[in-house]
């Protein structure tokens, strides 16, 4: 695979359309791309990955949309890569459609697409599923191995931190080993199918039927038991690994348990605050109780107010006397004549005023006037006391709860946490041992079942009633098993052979690149593809050797060089920030080596990373030199131009 053209449109800082042609010539594998900080160098690297593998979330896609373009109008962010693979030309295009917005911070991906155009027709259309695209890209450069071809050199020092099964599969894919593993799996599936078909096509005779049923049960049990990759053995292995991880977590927690000094200090402060609040509550209750002694007069005054508001008491005695005199006259004091109707109304009013209940209310009203109190002021003060008491009670409850929680934490840490963790540690150790015993028993049972399966197949095949189809299936099953075993042997030998070859090339490269070739003897690659550093007196992991960040970067470079030398995937190597933290000697060695990585090596560098002298050293291996720069007409946008003179950018840097 070689990238021969790349077009970027409205992608991150690249406003409008930018096209470069990074095709390399024979014996000139290097493509240099120079860019200052914040001009779009890493965005170019991101565009390459996006075109090949897309984005996981809508937010990530939205971030790719150019800010200027989205404020101008609705449109499409697009990356188009044309590549040469096995003498065929393919074009991969990914796009993100967006709507115009006045604020670029609110830009949002509306729709997105990807398609692949081949020499004669579409290989993957926009309507095809993602799995269809994955089948295409996996033939060229699967995503799980891209980390070894498209990488930021500053991140290489983290390479050794992860060597899980995914990394192992990625490396074996690069070396062509995974294809053999896939073939082994296919042959195992075929053998299982042949075995099942063999059981179905066997003679209908009663004895043969019984044997066939027994054989089917053996095959089912064998399939159920499985191996390290599937079935009961795999489940037990997963269960064991989970318990081992839990054990590591518990041991980590035991190491991380701290003392309770801070918790105790916090509790003591809360207890002091609780004491002060209780004293304040006691004083407030005393003041309230003192005020309660005045409740009688206060309530009397309030009663007077109620009587005055709710009953017509004022003037009860004087009004009655006045009405009595008025009923003896023919005319009102105002001069009007008192009619019969008016006389009856005055008489009715006089009778009400002279009733016993009315006279008692008037008497009580007279008494209440003698009570001297400031009702509103006293009631407000009483209400304030009650509010303070409620507030203090709530505060005391809250502080008491906090103290209980802190004490609980202290007790848990000091009295039970370590003991509980120790108990769990002991239990997990026991369970891990029991699980391993179960795994061993399953493997023993699997061996017994294999022997039983072959015995049953031999008996069935030897019977006169055996049909020709059953015989053919038996032979196919045997052949599939032989082929599978042969592939296993081939894989085992190939793994060792390829690992040794990669190890030798990585060691040679490391001694060539390191600034201490007299001290380091090379690198060793374990079965899990972990790296060991060889010195005259030791063989250590990177963690034990603890090399500098720059030396770790050189080790990772060396390992990737070994993989590139023996890969079955001829892919370009794209390096962002190539020098990173390297010292001058490491840098000089690496500059002389870059052209050996691949048939196409794209180096995205900052001006201070490669000098004019460095580029002069690489001059004979450089096909093209590009420069990323800020556009003259828009200081927020970047563009890429090819330099007519390979040394041009380097001369600018040195000036």
Image (cartoon, rainbow, N blue to C red):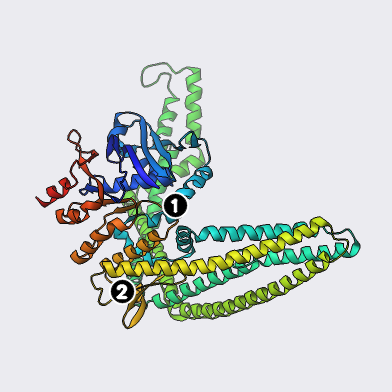
Q: Nearer the viewer, mark 1 or mark 2?
A: 1
Sequence-first disc among 1 and 2: 1
Q: Is residue 359 visible?
A: yes
101 or 455, nearer to the observer: 455
Residue beneath label 2, please?
Answer: 546
Residue beneath label 1, please?
Answer: 143
Seen as rendered, the residue at the extreme bottom is 537
Residue 459 placement, left or right of 309: right
102 or 89, nearer to the observer: 89
Q: Residues within 10 Å of mark 2 (few under 14, many from 20)?
A: few
Q: Residues within 10 Å of mark 1 (few under 14, many from 20)?
A: some
The residue positioned 12% from the left and 49% from the top of the image is 651
Task: Give the percent coordinates (x, y) of residue 303.
Answer: 42, 47
Q: For residue 547, which quarter of the picture?
A: bottom left
Q: CA distance from mark 1 to mark 2?
A: 30 Å
Q: For residue 212, which quarter of the picture?
A: bottom right
| 98 to 616, vertically: above or below | above
| 320 to 333, vertically: above or below | below
């Amino acid at each position: 695979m070689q990238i021969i053209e790349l077009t970027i449109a409205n992608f991150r800082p690249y406003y409008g359309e930018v096209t470069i042609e990074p095709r390399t010539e024979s014996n000139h594998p290097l493509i240099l791309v120079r860019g200052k900080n914040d001009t779009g160098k890493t965005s170019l690297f991101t565009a390459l990955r996006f075109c090949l593998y897309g984005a996981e979330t809508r937010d990530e896609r939205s971030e790719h949309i150019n800010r200027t373009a989205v404020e101008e109008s609705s449109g499409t962010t697009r990356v188009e890569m044309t590549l040469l693979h096995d003498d065929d030309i393919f074009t991969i295009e990914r796009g993100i459609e967006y709507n115009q917005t006045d604020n670029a911070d609110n830009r949002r991906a509306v729709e997105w697409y990807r398609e692949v155009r081949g020499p004669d027709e579409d290989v993957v259309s926009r309507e095809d599923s993602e799995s269809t695209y994955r089948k295409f890209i996996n033939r060229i450069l699967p995503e799980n191995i891209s980390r070894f071809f498209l990488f930021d050199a500053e991140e290489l020092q983290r390479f050794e931190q992860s060597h899980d099964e995914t990394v192992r599969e990625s490396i074996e894919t690069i070396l062509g080993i995974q294809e053999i593993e896939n073939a082994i799996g296919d042959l195992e599936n075929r053998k299982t199918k042949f075995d099942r078909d063999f059981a179905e096509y066997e003679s209908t005779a009663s004895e043969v039927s019984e044997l066939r049923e027994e054989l089917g049960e053996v095959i089912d049990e064998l399939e159920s038991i499985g191996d390290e990759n599937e079935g009961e053995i795999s489940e037990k292995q997963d269960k064991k690994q989970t318990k081992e991880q839990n054990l590591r977590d518990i041991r980590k927690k035991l190491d991380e348990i701290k003392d309770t000094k801070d918790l105790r200090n916090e509790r003591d402060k809360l207890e002091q605050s609780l004491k002060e609040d209780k004293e304040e509550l006691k004083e407030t209750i005393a003041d309230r109780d003192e005020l309660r002694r005045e409740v009688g007069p206060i309530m009397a005054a309030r009663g007077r107010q109620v009587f005055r508001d709710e009953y017509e008491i004022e003037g009860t005695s004087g009004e009655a006397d006045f009405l009595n005199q008025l009923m003896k006259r023919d005319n009102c004091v105002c001069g009007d004549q008192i009619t019969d109707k008016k006389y009856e109304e005055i008489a009715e009013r006089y009778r009400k005023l002279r009733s016993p209940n009315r006279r008692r209310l008037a008497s009580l009203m007279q008494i209440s006037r003698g009570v001297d109190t400031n009702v509103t002021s006293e009631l407000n003060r009483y209400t304030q006391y009650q509010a303070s008491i409620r507030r203090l009670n709530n505060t005391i409850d809250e502080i008491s709860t906090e103290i209980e929680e802190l004490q609980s934490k202290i007790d848990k840490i000091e009295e039970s946490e370590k003991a509980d963790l120790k108990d769990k540690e002991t239990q997990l150790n026991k369970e891990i041992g029991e699980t391993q015993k179960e795994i061993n028993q399953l493997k023993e049972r699997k061996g017994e079942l294999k022997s039983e399966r072959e015995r049953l197949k031999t008996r069935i095949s030897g019977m006169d009633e055996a049909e020709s189809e059953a015989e053919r299936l038996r032979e196919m099953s045997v052949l599939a098993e032989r082929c599978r075993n042969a592939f296993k042997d081939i894989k085992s030998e190939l793994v060792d052979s390829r690992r040794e070859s990669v190890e030798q090339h990585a060691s040679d490269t490391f001694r060539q690149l390191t600034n201490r070739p007299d001290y380091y003897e090379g690198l060793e690659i374990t079965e899990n593809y972990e790296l060991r550093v060889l010195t005259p007196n030791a063989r250590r992991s990177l963690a034990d050797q603890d090399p500098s960040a720059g030396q770790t970067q050189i080790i990772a470079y060396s390992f990737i060089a070994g993989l590139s030398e023996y890969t079955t995937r001829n892919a370009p190597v794209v390096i962002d920030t190539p020098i990173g933290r390297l010292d001058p000697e490491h840098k000089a060695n690496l500059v002389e080596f870059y052209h050996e990585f691949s048939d196409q090596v794209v180096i995205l560098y900052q001006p201070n990373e490669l000098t004019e002298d460095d580029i002069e050293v690489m001059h004979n291996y450089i096909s093209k030199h590009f420069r990323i720069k800020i556009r003259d007409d828009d200081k927020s946008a970047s563009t890429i131009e090819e330099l007519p003179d390979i040394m041009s950018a380097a001369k600018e840097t040195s000036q």
